[in-house]
Image: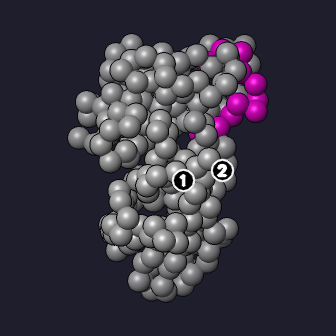
Amino acid sequence: GNSVTQMEGPVTLSEEAFLTINCTYTATGYPSLFWYVQYPGEGLQLLLKATKADDKGSNKGFEATYRKETTSFHLEKGSVQVSDSAVYFCALRGYNKLIFGAGTRLAVHP
Amino acid sequence: DTEVTQTPKHLVMGMTNKKSLKCEQHMGHRAMYWYKQKAKKPPELMFVYSYEKLSINESVPSRFSPECPNSSLLNLHLHALQPEDSALYLCASSQGLAGGTGELFFGEGSRLTVL
């Protein structure tokens, strides 16, 4: 079946550090892939998406590339800010629902 | 307008109470979802409506009763809940079950506490 595996957190970084959060997936076919972000006390916001192999999604300095050969969709940002502290969920689109990874908590300190 | 609105934001109820959570979207989406999220966990799917008809019930206990009065509204009726039902309840919508690029748009959630 379809599944998503994310690196375990928490990830703790200093401001302006480089961020990578690993995400790999198992799926039949080539589903759309997403990164959602959840700030403390809030709902989920779509951060970026990619709908086919080799697509690169980007938003707010975050990027992720749909890699078919490695079944991966790693999230990266060149310089994190304190305001990026949140939980990040990788997800893939099944036929009738999103399938989420376990989530990775990011804490950025000044 | 890419907004899903949920009310109330916070709800405290006793185990014998009856209450409802409400969700509204005006994006013309035809699929709507209820998710339950416990602390430090990913959201878990509860129900999916497609074109106002219940499409998926993920074996949710009958004390949770969904309703879709029209294509813009989704309710979740709560009755005789247990303390372990305390969680963040998230509503979401999408263009369809399988159409478009597939993203779901989430509301801010309703945080439920059952005493």
Quarter where residue A52 is shown: bottom left
Q: Is residue A60 left or right of residue B43?
A: left
Q: Is residue B30 visible?
A: yes
Q: Nearer the viewer, residue B11 or B56?
A: B56
Name the residue tied to disc 1: A27
Q: Nearer the viewer, residue B49 or B105?
A: B49
Determine the secondary structure under disc 1: loop
The question of residue B33 being in magenta is answered with: no
Are the numbered discs 2 and 1 placed on the same chain, yes or no? no
The way the protein has been coloured in the rendering is one colour
Magenta stretch: give its range: B78-88
Q: Residue at x 30, y 43 (%)?
A: B100
Answer above or below: position of A63 versus A103.
below
Query: Where residue A21 sits in the image (x, y, percent)?
Result: 54, 72
Q: Is A87 on the left or on the right of B72, as rendered?
A: right
Does residue B46 appear left or right of residue A79 in this picture?
right
Q: At label 2, which amino acid type do we have?
A: Lys
Q: Residue B15, position in %: x, y?
A: 74, 19
Dot 2: what SS? loop
Image vertical order of residue B6 relative to residue A19, above or below? above
Chain letter of the residue beneath label 1 in the structure image:
A
| Residue A98 on image: x %, y % | 50, 44
Q: CA distance from mark 2 to mark 1?
A: 22 Å
Residue B44, image x, y percentages: 61, 40
Residue at 33% in and 66% down: A55
Q: Residue at x 59, y 30 (%)?
A: B46
| Residue that label 2 marks | B41
